């Protein structure tokens, strides 16, 4: 079963939306600079899967008007708080597959941050094209893990393989993630857009042991573990990081895919 078909898993993040908002990182500023450099000035933006608003606040600051679509009511409740100071944002509680655009060509930008892999592209891509004005930009992006710095990498690998092999991420070693490559292929296959562009933004985040496991706790794979296994996994990770000085540096890369509607 592909991720976009697993609706229960997609909606699991709202179980502790506040922890998600606290633990998940934002995105490099250059990503938004590159996106809005090719978009119309002060564009009309629709965001798919806005979550708690990590990207919404950045999009709102550069948009004439923004519609944030989010299917999870718990996530949407935090989103309301996140954008409470903005006057150009509307929020609709819906998944994108069932959402109906009010008219053809109502958006200059359709964006999705860290959420596109939960959407069925066979339904969503034609709807994105319908929603965009001619020449409008479709943009999706994710944060992806590149590596854990230093000797901790091998120690953490052993812990993951013991308690939760499916959570082990060997890192990207500089190449594009499978999800980004699949998105590029789907956009090409749809025939609805010009050739997609891909931009990569390497960055590093240093976290305490507690911050690191709190971030892990927001991952869908973590939520599939039993409470007992998850506790043992997290306690083992905390001990290793504390023994190594109490913090961990994780190399990341944000990956942005943009395609223009013909």
Image (spheres, rainbow, N blue to C red):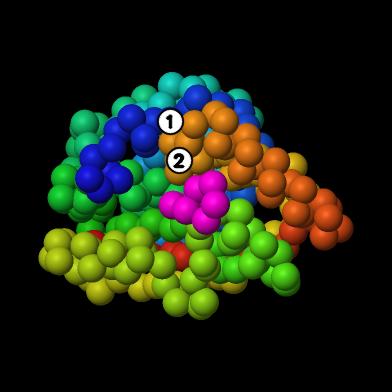
Q: Is residue 128 magenta?
A: no
Mark seen at residue 65: none
Does residue 258 show up? Answer: no
Residue at 36% over, 73% down: 197
Task: From the image, tell me which residue sits under label 1.
Answer: 12
Q: Nearer the viewer, residue 148 or 240?
A: 240
The answer to whether 119 appears left or right of 32 in the picture is: left
How far separated are the C-alphas under marks 2 and 1?
A: 7 Å
Q: Is residue 29 above or below residue 91?
A: below
Q: Is residue 162 magenta?
A: yes
Task: From the image, tell me which residue sits under label 2.
Answer: 220
Q: Give the position of the N terminus as an image quadrant.
A: top left
Residue 169: % across, % down: 50, 61
Q: Which SS class for mark 1?
A: helix
Q: Give the position of the C terminus as an image quadrant.
A: bottom left
How many callouts does the rendering have?
Answer: 2
Q: Is residue 146 above or below residue 54?
A: below
The answer to whether 250 appears left or right of 3 in the picture is: right
Does residue 157 show up? Answer: yes
Q: Tell me the magenta residue range.
A: 161-167
Residue at 21% over, 31% down: 98
Residue at 25% over, 74% down: 195
Local packing at callout 1 (Cα closer than 10 Å; few below 14, some 14-19, many 20+) is: some
Residue at 42% over, 72% down: 176
């Amino acid at each position: 079963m592909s991720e976009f078909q697993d609706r229960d898993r997609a909606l699991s993040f709202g179980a502790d939306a506040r922890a998600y908002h606290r633990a998940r990182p934002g995105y490099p500023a250059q990503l938004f600079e590159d996106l809005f450099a090719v978009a119309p000035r002060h564009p009309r933006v629709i965001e798919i899967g806005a979550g708690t608003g990590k990207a919404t606040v950045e999009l709102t600051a550069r948009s004439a008007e923004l519609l944030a679509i989010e299917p999870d009511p718990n996530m949407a409740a935090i989103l309301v708080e996140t954008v409470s100071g903005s006057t150009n944002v509307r929020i609709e509680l819906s998944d994108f597959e069932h959402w109906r655009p009010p008219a053809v060509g109502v958006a200059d930008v359709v964006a999705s941050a860290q959420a596109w892999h939960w959407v069925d592209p066979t339904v969503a891509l034609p709807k994105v094209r319908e929603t965009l004005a001619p020449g409008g930009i479709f943009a999706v992006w994710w944060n992806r893990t590149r590596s854990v710095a230093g000797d901790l990498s091998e120690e953490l690998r052993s812990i993951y393989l013991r308690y939760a092999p499916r959570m082990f991420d060997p890192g990207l070693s500089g190449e594009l993630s499978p999800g980004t490559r699949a998105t590029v292929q789907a956009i090409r296959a749809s025939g609805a857009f010009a050739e997609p562009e891909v931009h990569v933004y390497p960055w590093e985040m240093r976290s305490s042991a507690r911050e690191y496991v709190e971030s892990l706790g927001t991952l869908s794979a973590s939520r599939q573990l039993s409470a007992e296994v998850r506790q043992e996994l997290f306690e083992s990770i905390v001990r290793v990081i504390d023994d190594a000085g109490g913090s961990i540096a994780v190399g990341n890369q944000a990956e942005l895919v943009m395609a223009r509607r013909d």
